[in-house]
Amino acid sequence: MRRHWYWLIIVAFFVLAVLGVLYSCSWNNPYVTSLPSGATPGWYRDFEERTSGPVTASTTYYPCVLYDANHFGNSIGELIRTAGTDTYTVFPYYKMWVGDGNNTDFGYSNDGINWVFPTDGDNVVTAGYHPTVVYSATSFFGENKNNALTHYRFWTWDRGNMLVYYESENGADFAYANKTITNALGFGSAPVYSIAILYRPASAPKYEGWIDNNGRVYYINSNDCMDWQADVIPPANCVMHSGKTAGGSFDTPISTGGWASVVFFNGRYTIWYSSDVDGIGGYPNYNKGISYAESTNGWEWTLVDVLPYMGVNGTPAGPMENAILYASDGNIDRRNNRTYTPTVIYDAVHFSGAGENKAFKMWFTGDGSAYGRRIWYASFNEP
């Protein structure tokens, strides 16, 4: 009988110890709200940032990058523009459209790191930047479009109050297609600066969009990428709102600067977005970091893990974003002024040898004292 009590006491102590550890872990990490099935906390933070230098050599920001395993049907030696003289010097598995402060420029790469920006790629769209591009090898078969041979749908900020739409056969010669997205789909005032587009031709709707209406993100959708609507009356379609003041709090659990990149992965929506993560400067100071959230439907978002990833300069004031990068990461001079505007792409077979063997690749704007405003690169794997 005494031996039974002896073992019972040992088991009881063991159970109490385990419960104590679990309680301690949950108490010390109160910000984890949910995790995707099979994922580990912060899996999206386990990336490698390329620190040896930017991937662009001149003033550039707001990148849009696409990848195609068939190099967009282009061959080495093929003309980039119909009336141009420059030809592709490598297979363009990756294409980038990026702002130069006034216009949109075009570049290409065979690995996502070493880029060619030909002369014929300068100013492929004038008086507009903040580009978003959607590509279809089948010319968006069966969809409404102005040009039957369209392979590229292009939306960009007109440097005024709205987004304007273009079409292209080759990704470098663009024709204005007389379609716009205005703040009528948002909160009704201020500019619409950008749109993140998720294109899934087998889904309904085929196109889902997240527009940046001056620091607030609104969800819209379309079946042809030309005419967009909200499922509810604006501004009820607002899914993120960066109504933050210096040292204050967010109006909603998530704040954002609007420019976003959305990937549908493992049965859920994932969004990387520009945000104010350091709690200084106040709204609309949303060029200080890149944050991450998830959703099951595209309009109800969850901060999966809001503990800070980087940053050695103290705890941000007010509630924290789940920053994967921010400008005050130890005063890194390559991006200590601005760290924002991510574009993220995913490939289940890790891009088939075209560049790094990683599942996720990200290009973003870094503005710092060392290089000025340039495009930087990072990569990471799925959980």
Image (cartoon, rainbow, N blue to C red):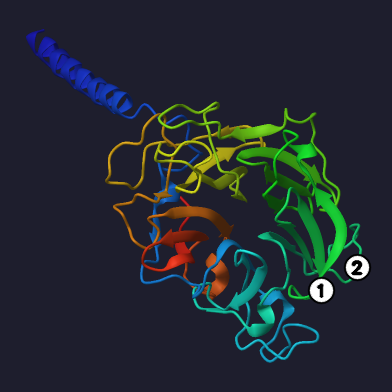
The secondary structure type at the circle numbered 2 is: loop
Mark 1 near mark 2, Cβ–Cβ under 8 Å?
yes
Q: Is residue 122 above or below residue 46?
A: below
Q: Which residue position is annotated with label 2?
A: 147
Q: Is residue 162 above or below residue 97?
A: above
Q: Which residue position is annotated with label 1?
A: 169
Q: Nearer the viewer, residue 95 or 178?
A: 178
Tell me which residue sits at (61%, 89%) in the image: 89
Q: Nearer the viewer, residue 204 or 57?
A: 57
Q: CA distance from mark 1 to mark 2?
A: 8 Å
| Residue 318 coordinates in the image, percent (x, y) | 40, 29
Tell me which residue sits at (41%, 54%) in the image: 337
| Residue 128 coordinates in the image, percent (x, y) | 71, 62
Q: Nearer the viewer, residue 296 or 12?
A: 296
Quadrant of residue 22 in the image? top left
Tell me which residue sits at (90%, 68%) in the image: 147
